[in-house]
Every structure is written in structure tokens, then in C-alpha cells.
Amino acid sequence: MRVGRLIDECINRGAQYADCITVIAKKLQVDYFNKNVIVSKSNSKVYVLKALVEGNWGLSVASEPNGNMIIEALRQASLKGPGSIKLAKRKPVQGGYVMCQKQAVVDGDGSEIIDYVKSVVSAIEKSGDENVRVAEGHVEASIRAKAMMSSDGVNAYEIKPSLIASFTAQTSNGETACVEVCGSGGFEVLGNINPQSIADEILFKLSCISKSKMLNPYYKGSRFDVVLSPHTAASIIQVVVENTLNAQNYKRNVKPLFDDLTIIDDPTLDGGYGSFFFDDEGVKARRKKLIEAGRLVSLIHNRETAYVYGVEPTGNGRGLAEPPQPRHSNIIVKPCDWDFKEMIEETKIGFLVDGVRSIHLIDELIVVEPEASLLIKKGEVKEAVKVSHFAVNLYEFYSNIKAIASSPLGSAPGSIGDCKSASYSPPLKMELRVF
């Protein structure tokens, strides 16, 4: 059965709207640990049919289009009874889009990736001391083709190659440090980065962790100026944006924003890990400012929330295993004019944080467990200290920012379900509570 017929039959049987997305994916995964290399490949193909019936979504999934998909999608929607879902109008996306890659790897044997991972591990082992016990690397390269048709005229496809890599080292005491690399493209995502720089970053973190001293107990629970490294800032900002600027859970209680803060959601970012040409509702992707010069200008919308707010969809309706939700793509914090060294020099007493082990949202509190924390006194980085976690109220995060650096820009990958995302940020200086 053809995809077009699935959609037509849903409409003929009472659906107000229907669409079908086809996803074909190839993956190449390389895992290197304990001097062993494991290379694995996988292929997948899935059809996802969605039907909107009397204000409710019904969804069905199959490896090949068939009549049972129609029955299941309509059954799911009808079981819920009359609903209230309405969709904002949009111009149906049409055409084909292909993201370029300079060095394709998915259809190869993974030799380039294996050599690169080995070079990172070798650099860690050569540059580190005998305290470094284990170093490993994991890389997943994929190419994903997505096609979409809908009852109101969507007829488009996109092809996206992407790569994500994680490198980890562990000391004999069990302390670990990690560096992640991600982007859209082929091997060039890794190839443009010197393996030694990854090794140096990991070893710096391990050195700080192993040499860290106990935190002054009088500091615990108090607020301090904290300078976040680029990767640290990127990791945190992604969680904050998703929980404060998503139209589905927006609470209108974000405190006054830092005047120089500009945050952009850009699914069209060249090389962005969260990039795409159209979302899972057939809305063409576009760059949009969420916060501009400390002023909220837009939220992240899908078609349902756009209808509720009376605005145009922003092209952020994402999700296959469920009806598309409003989710970010590539979050970018616009650099300002502060120099990174200047941010430290202007700190009388505070901390420098490099790396994040975990980020948790507990009620309305963002809790960040750092990898490496260093004490700053009178504008100088003094010594590594053991910090359990830093914390800040979710809705006070933007107002607690005190400075935004001009460079360098760090990145952090993310994902919600089957939706890849990323964030990009220069160093930030802000007030956080330390524990």
C-alpha cells in the first residue's frame, strides 16, 4: 500500500488531518575499550502514520505501509473521545533537502574513526601519568533520510548525516572525565579537531579532580560568582531553555533577564547536531530569536501551541513515537564583549567550573554536578576544590547571569526521545549557590 493511500483513507474515514513520515536510517558504531575494537552496523526503516480525529491524535507505526495502520491510528484517536486539539495554519513544506558531508563513513569499514579514537586514547596514555588506568572512545555515525506527506500538501524529504563521539578516561581511584563531540556531517566532524586537544582537556579535568581539596565548609550554601567554561555553559543552557521557553510548559514567571543576553534557536545552523530542514509537522525550519537583548521575543512552538497562542508555528514540532511536541533544535547564546580572562580577573572570590557530570531539575531548582571546580581568589585561579553541586532557581537563571564572553564557543549534544539537539555557548559568569 502506498503512503498516499494511507493518508487518503484516513481522511475518507473521518480524520480532519493525516500525515505519514518515513524514516530510513543507517548507523555505524565504533567502540574502543580495553584495547579492543568493536564495529557494528545497523539499518532501520519505519513508517509513522498520524491522524487527527475530533480533536485527538491517533498514531500507528509499521515497517511497511499497510491497512492495519489506518485502523490502529483511527482506533487510538476514537478511544479518547472528543478532544480539543487544533492546529495553527502553516505553509506545507515541499521539496528535497540534503545536508552535505565531506567524508562519508557510514558505508565504510570505520577505519578512519578507529584510527582517530586510537590516537585520542594514545595521547591520553602518553600525556597522562600512571594514575590514568582506563581510556576509551565511543563513536556513532549515522545517515538519516526522512520523507513526509500530509493531507494538506506536505511532500518533502531530507537527508542528514551526523556524528557524535564520547571519550572518557578513568583514574585508578575510579574518578572519570569525559569530552563529547557532535555535529552534522561525516568524519570531518571529528577530523577538524586535533586528538591531542581532546586528550589535554580530559587530562586537565582528571588532574583537577585528583588534586582537589575539601571545600571550605563555610562556603556551602552560599552564593558565589561562578565562571562556566564554554562546554559547561552549553550543557546547562540547553536544559534551562527547554524548561522555560517551551510553549507547552511556559509559566510566565521568568525573572527579569540579563540585558546583554540573546538566545537563538536555529535548526538551519550549518553543522549543527540538532539541525533539520523541516520539522515533524511539515513546517519549514527557520532561525528565530527567543531572547533578544534581555527581552523575551518568542517561545518554542509546535502547531498546537501556536494555535493556542495565536502565532505562527516556529518549526519546532518534533517527535515520531508520539505526536510532535515543541522542542528546541540548536540553542545558541550570542557572544558578547567580555574576555574570558577578564571574567576571571574581575572575580574577587568564586569558582571556575569545567565540565558537567549531571544536571537535574528538582522542582524548580537546577542542580549541576560539576566534573572539575577551581577556586578563584582576587582574580586568580588558585586550586581545585571538591564541590558536590551548584544550584540555581530555574526561573532566576537568566537574571543571575553577570557576564557573557566573546569566545570561545563550546558545544553540548542533547536528545529527547528520537530528537537530536545541541547547544552552543561562550563562557558565562553568573551567581550560583555552592554545596
Image (tube, rainbow, N blue to C red):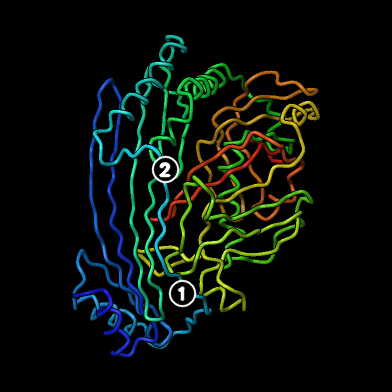
At label 2, which amino acid type do we have? Gly
Q: Circles 1 and 2: CB distance less than 8 Å? A: no
Crowding near pointer 2: few (<14 within 10 Å), some, many (20+)?
many
Whole-percent x, y for residue 348 in the image: 81, 27
Look at mark 2 in the image and give the residue it sits on.
185
Residue 416: numbered disc:
none
Whole-percent x, y for residue 32 in the image: 30, 27
Look at mark 1 in the image and give the residue it sits on.
92
At label 1, which amino acid type do we have? Pro
Which of the two discs, 1 and 2, labels the residue nearer the N terminus?
A: 1
**Distance of mark 1 from mark 2, alpha carbons?**
27 Å
Please tell me which residue is depicted at 21% across the width and 71% down the height of the picture. Answer: 65
Q: Is residue 293 above or below residue 15?
A: above
- Give the SS element for disc 2: loop
Please tell me which residue is depicted at 73% across the width and 45% down the height of the picture. Answer: 401
Relative side of 244 to 78, left or right: right
Q: Is residue 308 above or below residue 81?
A: above
Whole-percent x, y for residue 378 in the image: 80, 22
Q: Is residue 332 above or below residue 374?
A: below
Q: Nearer the viewer, residue 243 or 360?
A: 243
Q: Is residue 378 above or below residue 26?
A: above
Q: Nearer the viewer, residue 97 or 234?
A: 97
Picture quarter with the C terminus: top right
